[in-house]
Amino acid sequence: MIPGSFDYVRPATLDEAVAALRDAGDEGKVIAGGQSLLPLLRMRLAFPEVLIDVASVPELRGVRDEGSSLLVGAMTTHYEVLRDPLIRQHAPLVAAATSTVADPAVRHRGTFGGSLAHADPAGDLPAVVLAMDGVFVTSSREIPAAEFFADYLTSTLEPDEVLVGVRLPKSFAGWGFHYEKFHRTAQAWAIVGVACLVNRAGGEVAAARIALTNMGSTPVRASSVESAVSGGAADRDAFRAAAGSAAEGTSPPSDLHGSSDYRRHLATVLTARALSRAADV
């Protein structure tokens, strides 16, 4: 299908982008790489009157070292994230999950911030940022990841807010990590995914962070599993037992790719697998 008509604005600065959004009101929409928004426009599932293209805003690009954290610019492409040495050193879970996003063509155009602002619970990156306790930096405030995702395809961004970047803590240096994703084909969305971080202390788990993809209208933390494994043995049997509660408190969808019960089963299996691989056992 052909998208509806709209006006197009290409601001050169963040202030200009915010002003354009404010002028457009509820009828304005930010476009970055366009990998999520353009299909919605073509299918007439979104029909903004004004598109604000932020591709020329320099402060939205790149990865910056802020001492105790990294700030990943919203317009940084998936390809750039994958190749960035700071990401590989301090946030390897982000690189691992990004490598599973769609295909190389999409990764060259799609952006880190665009994927997150789209707030699709089947997307790979929202669960990763949630597991890492990332912070969303906007043109006017900072939003903890636990407060950013409101509902299906809905974030807590205000109509006149531009996502500037995401702050990722460096506090997970030395932690084991793994992103486990079950999908039909290499380019498909995750039917279920698990973002996992494990801090081992000898043969025990000192702490764990686990977040689930596509197990509800937003990414969710598997808090019960985190509590169950923390302080316990770092072995597969313990992980399988703890993963039995992975789906507690979730509301997975039922669709052509799987029922909600099937997704609950996958969450259990994939969480145990992700824990084992993150803990290297």
Image: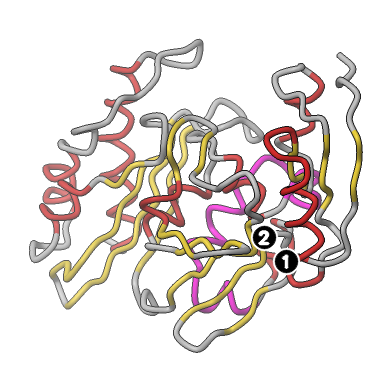
User: Which image quadrant is residue 5 in?
Assistant: top right
User: Of 121 and 150, which appears nearest the observer?
Assistant: 150
The x and y percentages for residue 141 are 52, 64
Q: CA distance from mark 2 to mark 1?
A: 5 Å
Please tell me whether residue 156 is drawn above or below residue 88 in the rendered image. Answer: above
Q: How many marks?
A: 2
Residue displayed at 72% across by 49% down: 22
Residue annotated with mark 2: 74
User: Which image quadrant is residue 270 in?
Assistant: top left
Assess whether residue 99 is covered by the magenta stretch.
yes
Characterize the magenta stretch by its predominant secondary structure: helix
In the picture, the disc for residue 60 is 1
Q: Are marks 2 and 1 in contact (CB under 8 Å)?
A: yes
The x and y percentages for residue 151 are 44, 33
Left or right position of 14 against 132 = right
User: Of 276 and 131, which appears nearest the observer?
Assistant: 131
